[in-house]
Amino acid sequence: MTVEQTYSPGLNGVIATETKLSFLDTENGEIVIGGYDLIQLSKTHGYLDIVHLLLKGTLPTDVERDELAKKLSTSYTVPETVLNVLKQLPKATHPMDALRTGISVLAGFDRELEDRSEHVNTARAYDLLAKLPTIVASSYRVLVGDEVLAPKSSLSYSANFLYMITGKEPTPLEERVFDQSLLLYSEHEMPNSTFTARVIASTLSDMYGALTGAVASLKGHLHGGANEAVMYMLLEADTPEEFEALLRSKLAQKEKVMGFGHRVYMKKMDPRALIMKEALTELSEKAGDDRLLRMCVAGEQVMAKEKGIYPNLDYYAAPVYYMLGIPIGLYTPIFFASRTVGLSAHVMEQHNDNKLFRPRVKYTGPRHHSIS
Ligand SMILES: CC(=O)SCCNC(=O)CCNC(=O)[C@H](O)C(C)(C)COP(=O)(O)OP(=O)(O)OC[C@H]1O[C@@H](n2cnc3c(N)ncnc32)[C@H](O)[C@@H]1OP(=O)(O)O
Ligand SMILES: O=C([O-])CC(=O)C(=O)O
């Protein structure tokens, strides 16, 4: 086969690697993670269970879950240098760029930086999982001039994450919904950011480098940045009717509507979006305010009718985060913090069985110019 015969724009449908971590089985509507369906797990298990599943290969026992929670909570605190560097950043810095910087700074504190063994990489992944929520919450607080809050190890992983962001200990419902969002964002086969991380890791570069590349990838609006874009779009309208009109005008101008469509699900609803829609319904009932929910449903109906395109996870995660009182600039950093487990697992898998990524091109430039 020639290089040209194998060309698929955007690598659409191309198998990039073998993995034991996850697979989107769109025919059967399953997101397979370590042999389980993520959607089923989202109804019975929590984020730390997925962390154990991805990094240890099994769902944890109660004892193992407690040990994991304890292990993470003892590493929440980040080196003072990280906070000092974040304080030097221009105030207009996007929290995703602050996060990228924070991860880079952490690399300098890793005394085993050149060690790619599974044992050291696993310990590194746990350390990153412990520290990223602190970097995400602190960077935002530093940028807007608020006091940085010390982590509370008495709270669960997710409750502490939310507390460090909002400054208020979450209710059981808020904690459960936030934890569920982290679980849904934790791992998703081979999106652009995971591919980016694996490409970087395939040069035998380290986990921090692979992750900072993945932050840049995830920031884009066609990928993780869509959750922030969805919220800004929702805030442009006040009623379902206004939101419907807004989406119709975007479609008329051939604009992409954020939070809709997906390379793999294509013309089907992302099953994770449904779980967040249910969470939004619960939060709306509790708050006695279903305006955002009604707007989202109206938007979903317009897009189905006009384009046959359905919501992805970002569409319903955005209003859920809004109702949890999370600043919009943190939606994508939170997505990244939860995806850290999936990304780390992919980096380890790449390091353990490596083949350098080096594709070819379909050349469309000039040839045979003569040098006079
Ligand atoms: C967690 C995540 O990262 S999920 C993805 C989050 N991203 C977004 O929500 C951004 C909005 N969505 C999109 O831009 C796209 O659906 C993507 C980037 C996610 C997938 O794109 P691709 O697989 O490359 O499909 P592509 O962009 O070519 O779209 C195919 C067709 O559907 C249309 N389409 C796809 N998504 C949308 C959308 N959100 N709004 C309007 N039309 C859309 C395209 O215009 C195109 O129509 P055409 O064939 O008539 O030209
Ligand atoms: O799979 C993708 O391309 C994007 C996505 O939904 C994710 O990363 O969660």
Image: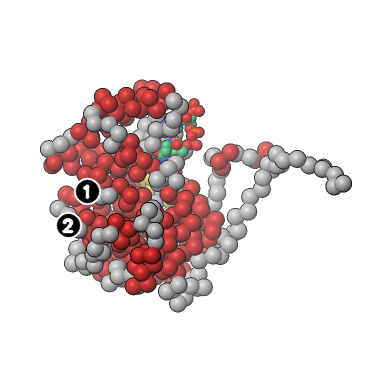
Q: Is residue 322 left or right of residue 129?
A: left
Instruction: Find residue 124 and report its horizontal and vertical position in percent.
Output: 41, 69
Q: What residue lies at 72% left-to-right and 40% top-to-bottom?
A: 365
Query: What's the CA distance linking mark 1 and mark 2?
Result: 10 Å
Residue 230 position by quadrant: top left
Mark 2 Cα-neighbour bin, 10 Å: few <14, some 14–19, many ≥20: few
Q: Is mark 1 within 8 Å of ligand 1?
A: no
Q: Is residue 340 left or right of residue 278?
A: right
The reply to whether callout 1 and callout 2 are in contact (CB within 8 Å) is: yes
Q: Which element is circle 2 on?
A: loop
Q: Amino acid at mark 2?
A: Lys
Q: What residue lies at 15% left-to-right and 36% top-to-bottom?
A: 289
Q: Is residue 149 above or below residue 40?
A: below
Q: Is residue 162 above or below residue 73?
A: above
Residue tagged 2: 168
Q: Which mark is residue 325?
A: 1
Q: Is residue 107 left or right of residue 272?
A: right
